Amino acid sequence: MNVIFDMDGTLVDSVPGIRASLAYALDQQGHRLAEETDITALIGPPMDKIVAALLAPFGDDRVAQTVAIYREHYGRVGLLQGLMYPGIQQVLQTLHAEGHHLFIATSKRQPFAERILARIGISALFDDILGTPLDGSMDDKRLLVAHLLGKQGLLPSSSVMVGDRKEDIVSAQHNHLLSIGARWGYGSQQELTSSGADRLCQ
């Protein structure tokens, strides 16, 4: 079986680092990310959508510039703050030992994804790690998953997608994969169910 994992909210709790870098980027643009602002529900879609949502209350449309500030800070500071969810390493090691082929398809930029997984020590468990290209050409996760399937020659009938947000479920459906919703992540059970997840996993 080929098991394709999302990363943020599925393998790694990235909220602390993402929040720190978003707060920095907003501050550099003259705004403040309020302490009570919960960014958890925003994580999953491409970063430009997240930043646009945070800038909207300020009437600020400098999305691309703010994203660039965010990524510069995240590359230096934020990505060092992600933590692997408890039990994930054991699950991955078990699947790998049983002969399943493991992959990652994440909306995170490719260099960030590679550095995070290397830092937490699980890169070797994956046949391929696919993040989004720097030019934004595959920010639509449906395209990213399709590219992974084609690149690796994976059959949809023997592949599954595991993720915590609507984008993961929709990407699986678009590419004719079985979808498994990760309930410990950033998306709610309602989001996963209404998106049409085939299975939910605790």
Image (spheres, grey):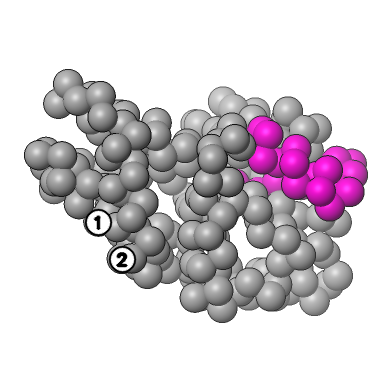
Structural crowding at the residue carrying mark 2, measured as other residues with C-alpha within 10 Å and reported as few (<14), some (14–19) or many (≥20): some
Q: Would residue 146 be found to the left or right of residue 30 on screen?
A: right
Residue numbers of the magenta segment: 142-165
Structural crowding at the residue carrying mark 1, measured as other residues with C-alpha within 10 Å and reported as few (<14), some (14–19) or many (≥20): some
Q: Amino acid at mark 2?
A: Val
N-terminal-most mark, 2 or 1: 1
Q: Residue 178: which quarter of the image?
A: top right
Q: Residue furthest top?
A: 59
- Find out whether residue 152 is within the magenta segment: yes
Q: Residue 198: which quarter of the image?
A: top right
Task: Please name whichever residue, 133 or 179, is drawn nearer the observer in this view of the structure.
Answer: 133
Residue 38 picture location, percent across and down: 26, 43
Which quarter of the figure is the C terminus placed in? Answer: bottom right
Mark toward the viewer: 2 or 1: 2
Residue corresponding to mark 1: 20
Residue 77 marker: 2
* Residue in the picture at 64% in, 49% down: 105
Would residue 28 be visible to someone looking at this image?
yes
Q: Would residue 130 be found to the left or right of residue 160 on screen?
A: left
Instruction: Identify the secondary structure beneath mark 1.
Output: helix
Task: Please name whichever residue, 185 or 201, is drawn nearer the observer in this view of the structure.
Answer: 185
Which quarter of the figure is the N terminus placed in? Answer: bottom right
* Residue in the picture at 39% in, 31% down: 49
- Find out whether residue 23 is within the magenta segment: no
Q: Are marks 2 and 1 in contact (CB under 8 Å)?
A: yes
